[in-house]
Amino acid sequence: MQQLNKQIDDWFIGYKTHAVKPKRSSLGGGSNPNRNTKPFAKTGLKSGTGLKNLQAAAAKKPEVMVKIAKRVSKNSKGINGVQNHMKYISRNGELPLETRDGDKVQGNQAIQSLMNHWQKSGIRENSDKREAINIVLSMPAGTPPQAVLNAARQFAAEQFEKHEYAFVLHHESERDGEPPHPHVHLCVMVRDYDGIRLNPRKNDLFEWRVRFAEKMREQGVECTATRRQHRGQSIKGQKADIRQIILRTIQEEKQGKQPENIKRSHIAQTNVEAILEALQAQQRPQHPFQGKAQQAKDHITEQYSLISRELYKLGYKTEAKIMKDFANEVSGKSLDTQAQQIYDRHAHSCQQSQTQTSEPKNPSRDDWEMER
């Protein structure tokens, strides 16, 4: 089983991480040409984590969320930007921050003292570079908030052992007005003690999600961290506001109304126009990456079937059935894009409306009696 777990883990992660740039910083620090790559064996994750996440996904356990939050403030760089963010996540000093050393920092004056300490590493008050990465680790509503906080603390200590950082829990139990889903804001200094700057990419975020899920399970919370492709989802979830704009605009067009003059992002406007054009032309939108999406799904289901067979050979019949069923489920998932799904719904709705208006009234028994 140990050998199978190793093979699954290597396939599940499936990449070399590039979380740091292999170059010398202006503050010093060595440059190792092999530093920017590390296989699964060097991630520090537990053996068997790949299979655990896949089985949890098959059981529909909640996916952990890890994202890098964007700050759009004009004062988001340099130590001033870091301090502004600290004040924001602490709700202007009301909520206590926790540092890598376990110290509690509460109040704007304490935040200023922490910034003075961090600035000694050579960070300017205002600079052209971002000096901190703002990470959000989140779980669905109903998850014990203390478990999320504990998991975030362990995650940060393991993932960013050479960086300064501070974090805080946001949850309705901590402060009125906070959301019901517990989440932790983690502010990590980009430059580590060796002067190497963090440079996370998409694959690094996946490793972070896998690590956070591992820490959540250690807290007794069932969860998973998988890619969309692992679950048979070929498209990214659409933002609710964009979806509502599209649906409202289509409805207004069908009713002959002038669409509201709403300020939209370029992406939202493009989506609306593309779907409206498709409906007017009565031509279903094309999937731009149909072939690649199908290849990816075929590869995933093939691997699941292989894992199932190997588990069965080793006597793990229950686990083998779970993976076999998961392979069948993923294989049956649709590859339709969001544009295609919206088009299908509204085309079907239009067809039903036309059918109802064109069909003659079906006379009742009373009508026949009156005619006789």
Image: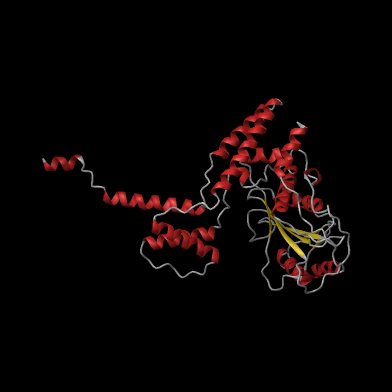
Residue at 79% in and 70% down = 79
Q: Residue 104 at what x, y percent from top left?
A: 81, 60
Residue extending furthest toward the left: 372
Relative height, residue 173 to residue 89 (above, below): above
Return the residue nearer the eye: 108 or 2: 2
Q: Quadrant of residue 60?
A: top right
Q: Residue 255 at what x, y percent from top left?
A: 36, 62
Residue at 70% in and 38% down = 51
Quadrant, the N terminus: top right
User: How is colour applied across the structure in the image?
Assistant: secondary structure
Relative height, residue 236 to residue 267 (above, below): above
Q: Residue 174 at what x, y percent from top left?
A: 70, 57
Q: How many marks?
A: 0
Q: Quadrant of residue 283?
A: bottom left
Return the residue nearer the eye: 31 or 44: 31
Return the residue nearer the eye: 346 or 274: 274
Task: Decide if residue 59 is in sight here.
Answer: no
Q: Residue 72 at what x, y percent from top left?
A: 66, 69
Residue at 79% in and 62% down = 190
Quadrant, the C terminus: top left
Q: Is residue 240 left or right of residue 170?
A: left
Task: Decide if residue 337 is in sight here.
Answer: yes
Q: Is residue 332 left or right of residue 153?
A: left
